[in-house]
Image (cartoon, rainbow, N blue to C red):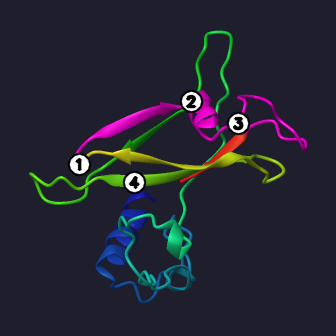
């Protein structure tokens, strides 16, 4: 049986499987050609793109981790990788804190400027405070935050 399946696999890889054999000696029976369907090509290739909230593009960070007895909580890292080497281009990110169940905005949206080719890590409690809200002061049934960037 291993030889028969190996042969079927080899033929399938070469695209030459048009028919199959039927037998009681362990060879694969009819219907193999029905199992081989043409592979559809992808409509487009995914690649990185800039986030631009003014055009409706957001990145949503959810769920977020609020912390435990050891003090572990979510941190968001913002990276500025625009412009050519030696550029003084700064990336500006707008962050909005939203309740995970209600969709309520906590505080107000705010911006963070990241210098060229730099990275900044901001803890969840600082993000909420920078938005002007009180950390873990949930309303409307919220139990956590989602961060819109």
Residue linked to disc 1: 116
**CA distance for labels 2 and 1:** 22 Å
| Left or right: residue 33 compared with residue 92 | right
| Left or right: residue 54 compared with residue 104 | left
Q: Residue 106: where, in percent of width, then height?
A: 73, 44
Q: Residues within 10 Å of mark 1 (few under 14, many from 20)?
A: some
Q: Circle 2 sits in a helix, a strand or a loop, which is it?
A: helix
Residue 134 among magenta residues = yes
Along the line of sight, the residue nearer the viewer: 17 or 13: 13
Q: Earlier in the sequence, mark 4 or mark 3?
A: 4
Q: Circle 4 sits in a helix, a strand or a loop, which is it?
A: strand
Of tags 3 and 1, the one toward the viewer is 3
**CA distance for labels 3 and 2:** 10 Å
Q: Circle 1 sits in a helix, a strand or a loop, which is it?
A: loop
Residue linked to disc 2: 126
Q: Residues within 10 Å of mark 3 (few under 14, many from 20)?
A: some
């Amino acid at each position: 049986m291993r030889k028969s399946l190996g042969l079927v696999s080899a033929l399938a890889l070469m695209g030459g499987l048009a028919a199959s054999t039927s037998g009681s000696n362990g060879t694969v029976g009819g219907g193999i050609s029905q199992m081989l369907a043409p592979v559809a090509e992808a409509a487009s290739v995914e690649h990185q793109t800039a986030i631009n909230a003014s055009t409706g593009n957001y990145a949503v960070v959810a769920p977020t981790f609020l912390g435990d007895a050891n003090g572990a909580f979510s941190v968001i890292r913002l990276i500025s990788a625009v412009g050519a080497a030696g550029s003084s281009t700064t990336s500006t990110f707008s962050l909005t804190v939203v309740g995970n169940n209600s969709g309520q905005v906590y505080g107000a949206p705010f911006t963070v400027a990241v210098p060229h080719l730099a990275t900044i890590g901001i803890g969840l409690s600082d993000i909420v405070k920078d938005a002007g809200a009180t950390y873990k002061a949930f309303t409307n049934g919220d139990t956590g935050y989602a961060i819109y960037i």
